[in-house]
Image (tube, rainbow, N blue to C red):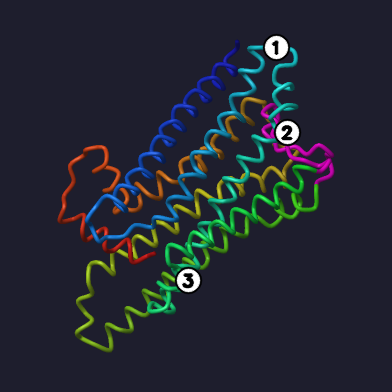
């Protein structure tokens, strides 16, 4: 093995370790929310349905990503001649379908969360009825079902998609052609997270503008509650991080599509490491959004694993965060 091979091996090992940590976090997050929701006397609510779908998509997606990344070295170790191709021909396209479904689920759940926030801002009285837990479960289930159908149609066609670790590309069986649904997704999918970012940004600017106007009209509004300020800050942080983490993969794909000759001319190790970085942005989404940027769920996780937290601070943060949902 030369230096490039060792570098790629080290990057794959680091990637696997970090993804395992993120996967463990997803499981702990789900268990802590279950405990808080059904086995706690606390009246503070958490975005239970959103977290349930995000963690399930996160865990399943990470398992699929393990196969996508590690099937190449493992397959070649078992059979240096046809090991990896045997994997791709047997379950490769199923693994690709699973990873894509989980990724799309996170993107569209984030869009639903954005619509939820807008409804709270426009009609705070009616929003709880529109987005009750039961209705949220129906909305999320309908989203996942629709996404699954859109992926199964190309899957059972002659233009199914199968990830190739040797090129770090999602290749179609009818290349260079693509199924119309696959082509549509490749062209326009990036606008889903971009739209969510734009809506969140406009909403935050509106809230800040409205608050400034309120301050000028009423002296009583000069002392705004810490919960409102914290809610705005949380929305800013979440919008920023969700935007970055959901857009990294898509922007990377756009660069590869606009400059295919440049990307294909790079060493295979560089192509693989670039894809690992893009893929890790997806795998670490739940950790960075629900742990580093959402203090209420961070506190739940820390309490679940036995980490002592400040109860007084917890109440304020939890109250501020739950108003976002």
Gap in Å between the C-alphas at discs 3 and 2? 38 Å
- Of the residues tagged 1 and 2, which is closer to the observer? 1
- Label 2 neighbourhood size at 10 Å, few (<14), some (14-19), many (20+)? few
- Residue denoted by label 1: 80
- Of the residues tagged 1 and 3, which is closer to the observer? 1
Which comes sooner in the sequence, label 1 or label 3?
1
Q: What count of labels does the image hold? A: 3
Say whether marks 1 and 3 touch (CB < 8 Å): no
Does 208 appear above or below 308?
below
- Of the residues tagged 3 and 2, which is closer to the observer? 3
Residue 261 position by quadrant: top right
- Residue denoted by label 3: 202
Q: Which residues are magenta?
A: 157-178
Residue at 84% x, 39% y is 174
- Residue denoted by label 2: 264
For this orientation, the residue located farthest to the bottom is 217
């Amino acid at each position: 093995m030369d230096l490039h091979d060792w570098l790629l091996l080290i990057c794959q090992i680091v990637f696997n370790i970090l993804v395992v940590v993120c996967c463990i976090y997803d499981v702990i997050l789900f268990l802590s929310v279950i405990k808080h929701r059904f086995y706690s006397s606390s009246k503070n609510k958490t975005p239970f349905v959103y977290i349930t779908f995000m963690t399930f998509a996160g865990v399943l997606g990470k398992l699929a990503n393990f196969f996508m990344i590690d099937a190449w070295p493992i397959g070649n170790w078992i059979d240096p001649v046809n090991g990896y191709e045997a994997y791709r021909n047997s379950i490769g396209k199923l693994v690709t379908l699973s990873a894509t479904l989980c990724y799309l689920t996170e993107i569209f759940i984030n869009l639903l969360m954005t619509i939820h926030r807008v409804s709270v801002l426009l009609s705070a009285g009616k929003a709880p009825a529109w987005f009750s837990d039961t209705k949220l479960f129906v909305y999320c289930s309908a989203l996942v079902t629709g996404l699954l159908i859109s992926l199964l149609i190309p899957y059972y066609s002659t233009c199914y998609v199968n990830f190739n670790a040797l090129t770090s590309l999602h290749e179609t069986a009818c290349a260079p052609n693509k199924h119309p649904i696959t082509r549509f997704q490749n062209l326009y999918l990036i606008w889903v997270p971009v739209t969510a970012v734009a809506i969140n940004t406009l909403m935050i600017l509106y809230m800040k503008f409205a608050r400034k106007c309120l301050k000028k009209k009423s002296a009583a509004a000069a002392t705004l509650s810490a919960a409102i300020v914290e809610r705005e800050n949380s929305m800013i942080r979440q919008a920023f991080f969700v935007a970055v983490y959901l857009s990294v993969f898509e922007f990377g794909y756009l660069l590869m599509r606009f400059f295919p000759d440049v990307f294909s001319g790079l060493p295979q190790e560089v192509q693989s490491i670039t894809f690992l970085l893009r893929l890790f942005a997806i795998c670490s989404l739940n950790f960075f959004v629900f742990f580093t940027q959402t203090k209420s769920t961070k506190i739940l996780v820390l309490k679940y694993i036995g980490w002592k937290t400040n109860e007084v601070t917890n109440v304020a943060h939890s109250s501020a965060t739950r108003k976002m949902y």
